[in-house]
Amino acid sequence: MVRAVAPSIESIYGDVVRRNPGEEEFHQAVREVLDSLAPVLARHPEYTEMKMIERICEPERQIIFRVPWTDDRGEVQINRGFRVEFNSALGPYKGGLRFHPSVYLGIVKFLGFEQVFKNALTGMPIGGGKGGADFDPKGRSEGEVMRFCQSFMTELYRHLGEHTDVPAGDIGVGGREIGYLFGQYKRITNRYESGVLTGKGLAWGGARVRTEATGYGATFFASEMLAAHGTSLEGRTVVVSGAGNVALYAVQKATQLGARVIACSDSGGYVVDEGGLDLEVLQHVKEVQRGRLSEYADRVPSARHVAGGSVWDVPCAVAIPSATQNELDGDAAARLVRNGCIAVSEGANMPSTPEALEVFRAAGTAFGPGKAANAGGVATSALEMQQNASRDSWTFEHTEARLQQIMHDVYARCSEAAEEYGSPGDLVVGANVAGFLRVAEAMHAHGLV
Ligand code: GLU
């Protein structure tokens, strides 16, 4: 039999760029994974032969749809909705929905691609997918948000199901939006299918700790990294970027673990409070009032608000970037290192640029990539699915203990794979290799599908 010469990782990457033009974030996410895989292919020639990498880089299904709705003035609005069902080797497609004006196919594909590996790292039975819309919820009324969600679900429902595809929240999609989406799904299908969405309210099938899970998980991951270096969060200064769901609960958990969280940020700038941020005020400003961080400084005399500027200027021992992709560039990374930062745990998806990653690598900074460090959110979604399937509801303590154990296991999987594949201590390589191996093994067993 004549066999084609095995394509190099470089040529696989070239094909991904050519087949997905203009989707920079997707290219970036693929590049980082592919850069880790050479030693895996060397050990598994069957994966080259079966074109495993090429198959994993191609989503199983991509759905793009029109979302028409009327605003409060009666004007017709049109948005674009997306769901990329990336990989179902390990379970139903699982991953959040993002409502933000920056959303386009390249963002959804980068997030979906990351989600495949992240979900594999949790060790749970979930495949990877992601979706969203270029809808900007900022300044929209309750009624507008509801009508948008209803229109979005009126198209998407046909692709979902507890055994098929299970969305959750992401930027711009929280408990309120999941409520409207679930209500419309139930109305159209005439089924109370709890397991079709996660991040639900506690009164109607939601799970305790799901709200807190991503921020808690990123903090537990930071603790794991510090423990491996013989230290802990106790008495450390922490800076968190962002002021959304992930950031707020990272602030809470880090504070509970004895750290002093001195700064967080939003799109208008950042606040510094050397005594430690007051979570209750933060929650009130961001979650109840849906307001700006400058209002935090108006209320807390010890706090200072810096308009514009980068939160990474604030010296800290531990950084938990929890805002959005590419928020932490090479310069910011160099400043963090110069100011004594010893560990970075990514609460957001791909917040560090490739240049930042290089800086951390060169400096020997402990670095937890998002697909490992922020896996607590989706892992707790899987726990929500488990509770829904058994019509059960667990206590906060039990669920949090499960989450902490899962983060411990995610850390161990990354660190062991890094060691085994020749890059000890490099959790980027470890996460990519461990995630890839779990997905590839399942795909291999399923044959050429
Ligand atoms: N959007 C979250 C993530 O990036 C959560 C997804 C989920 O719970 O399905 O992992």
Image (cartoon, rainbow, N blue to C red):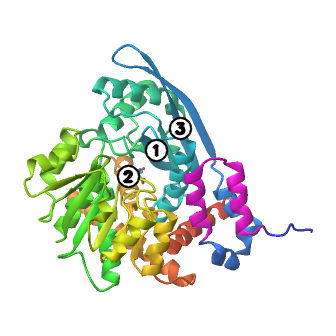
**Residue 306 place in picture, x, y as percent:** 23, 53
The label number, if any, that marks residue 381 in the structure image: 2
Q: Are marks 2 and 3 in contact (CB under 8 Å)?
A: no
Q: Which residues are magenta?
A: 7-35
Residue 9 found in image quarter: bottom right
Q: Does the stretch in magenta take in 168?
A: no
Work out whether residue 410 can be spotted: yes
**Residue 158 place in picture, x, y as percent:** 53, 32
- In the structure shown, which secondary structural element does the residue marked by tag 3 occupy? strand
- In the structure shown, which secondary structural element does the residue marked by tag 1 occupy? strand
Q: Are marks 1 and 2 in contact (CB under 8 Å)?
A: yes
Label 1 sits on what residue type?
A: Val
- On the image, numbered disc 3 is attached to which residue? 82
Q: Residues within 10 Å of mark 3 (few under 14, many from 20)?
A: many
User: Which of the pair 407/230 is nearer the observer?
Assistant: 230
**Would the CB of label 2 be found within 8 Å of ligand 1?**
yes
Q: Is residue 323 left or right of residue 212?
A: right
Q: Does the stretch in magenta take in 20?
A: yes
**Would the CB of label 3 be found within 8 Å of ligand 1?**
no
Residue 55 found in image quarter: bottom right
Camera-near label (1 vs 3) is 3
Inter-mark Cα distance, 1 to 2: 9 Å
- In the structure shown, which secondary structural element does the residue marked by tag 2 occupy? helix
Work out whether residue 87 can be spotted: no
- On the image, numbered disc 1 is attached to which residue? 166
Label 2 sits on what residue type?
A: Ser
Residue at 41% x, 43% y: name it. Answer: 195
Q: Residues within 10 Å of mark 1 (few under 14, many from 20)?
A: many
Q: Quadrant of the N terminus?
A: bottom right
